[in-house]
């Protein structure tokens, strides 16, 4: 009887996390707690960092193999939920919600702002080149490079096709730097601009008609997908969501896409991406390199957007010049990077409101990152 009890107790203890815990688990759980702290205390992208942070904790609870509870164990609940990440199901649904929430009026009223969104994609291709130079394969380098677009769903979508083995590190890096936009971008913006440039006042955007708002997603879907068919899952859902919003006759569908649907998918994608960072698969030197390249790609993206505006201003008349502080908004972190443009502008002139102007390149960055992903996919898949 006593021996049987001892055997049962030892078997129970062998299944506990205390017995199976390694230093890697503790490190990753600490990282998860830091993510949650940043979300709650600093309010850095709480809708992303709290699900991801909790997912990191959940994915690094030590357990014995064979219980079908881990995210990489076939048949487990988490494994089924992770299917949407592995097969690229969640990112297009996120884009549907983004489209239903996005007002493209600032871009429609000043079409040249789309060029800033294109210029900011420099970060993607710069990181791609650097990754190739330090030994990553072309498909891995492309997946890492897309971090520079500041677009977590696009990074997940592309890496699920080209480098699924690096998806955890790429996704965590992309979402981390999206949350750190207010920290990373301002020093680069100040370094590249003069006080005179920061004080530039832009003309108020013209009023955009309802017809223009309806035609915009229809024209864009044809232009972008005919040019880059491989970007259709992301671009198609983005412009479909926007048409639901702007048509004026599908309010219920637009409300669902921009509210409950995107909230549900955000929870699932954040939690499962966090869970995928199990210490045994995540704590590698490659992950450190990916984080470093991700930071570099963000800096280059900001450099590309701000510098392009400065060059563009050389060809514009004084009344039409663009404040280069909105150049950072060419990345896809909507609306955080546009908000950074506005806050930086207000540091030098409290009466200069850049938010609406910055939303132009910001939404262009969403389109640009999806197009860039489609281009890379068409060459490398």
Image: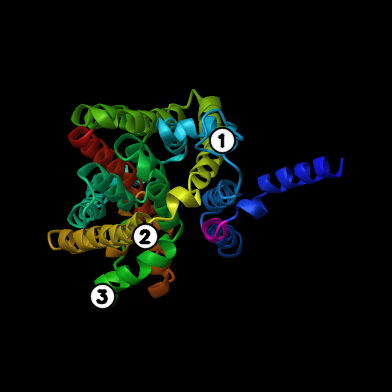
The answer to whether marks 1 and 2 mark residues whose Cβ atoms lie closer than 8 Å is: no
Q: Which residue is mark 1?
A: 78
The N terminus: image quadrant: top right
Q: Position of residue 56 (x, y in %)?
A: 54, 50
**Relative to the observer, which residue lies in front, 261 or 361?**
261
**Which mark is on residue 288?**
2
Q: Main secondary structure of the magenta part?
A: helix
Q: CA distance from mark 1 to mark 2?
A: 25 Å
**Residue at the extreme right:** 1
Label 3 secondary element: loop
Q: Position of residue 350 (x, y in %)?
A: 44, 71
Q: CA distance from mark 3 to mark 1?
A: 51 Å
User: Given this view, does label 3 or label 1 mark the residue nearer the observer?
Assistant: 1
Sequence-earlier tag: 3 or 1: 1
Q: Residues within 10 Å of mark 2 (few under 14, many from 20)?
A: some
The magenta region covers: 22-29
């Amino acid at each position: 009887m006593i021996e049987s009890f001892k055997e049962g107790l030892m078997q129970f203890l062998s299944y506990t996390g205390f017995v199976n815990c390694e230093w890697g688990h503790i490190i990753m759980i600490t990282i998860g707690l830091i993510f949650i702290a940043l979300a709650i205390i600093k309010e850095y992208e709480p809708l992303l960092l709290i699900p991801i942070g909790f997912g990191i904790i959940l994915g690094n609870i030590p357990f014995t193999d064979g219980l079908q509870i881990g995210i990489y164990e076939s048949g487990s609940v988490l494994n089924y939920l992770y299917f949407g990440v592995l097969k690229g199901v969640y990112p297009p649904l996120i884009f549907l919600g983004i489209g239903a929430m996005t007002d493209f009026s600032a871009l429609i009223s000043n079409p040249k702002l789309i060029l800033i969104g294109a210029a900011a994609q420099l970060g993607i291709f710069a990181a791609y080149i650097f990754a190739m130079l330090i030994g990553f394969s072309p498909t891995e380098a492309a997946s890492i490079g897309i971090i520079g677009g500041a677009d977590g769903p696009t990074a997940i979508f592309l890496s699920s096709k080209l480098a699924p083995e690096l998806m955890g590190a790429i996704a965590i890096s992309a979402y981390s730097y999206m949350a750190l936009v207010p920290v990373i971008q301002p020093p680069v913006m100040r370094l590249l601009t003069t006080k005179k440039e920061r004080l530039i006042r832009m003309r108020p955007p013209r009023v955009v008609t309802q017809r223009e708002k309806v035609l915009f997603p229809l024209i864009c879907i044809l232009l972008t997908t005919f040019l880059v068919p491989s970007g259709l899952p992301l671009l198609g859902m983005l412009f479909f969501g926007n048409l639901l919003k702007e048509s004026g006759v599908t309010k219920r569908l637009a409300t669902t896409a921009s509210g409950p649907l995107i909230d549900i998918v955000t929870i699932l994608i954040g939690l499962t991406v966090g869970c995928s960072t199990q210490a045994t698969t995540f704590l590698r030197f490659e992950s450190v390199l990916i984080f470093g390249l991700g930071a570099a790609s963000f800096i280059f993206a900001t450099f590309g957007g701000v510098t392009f505006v400065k060059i563009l201003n050389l060809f514009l008349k004084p009344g039409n010049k663009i404040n280069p502080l909105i150049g950072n908004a060419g990345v896809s972190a909507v609306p955080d990077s546009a908000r950074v443009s506005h806050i930086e502008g207000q540091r030098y002139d409290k009466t200069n409101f850049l938010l609406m102007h910055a939303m132009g390149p910001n939404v262009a960055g969403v389109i640009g990152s999806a197009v860039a992903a489609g281009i890379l996919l068409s060459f490398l898949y």
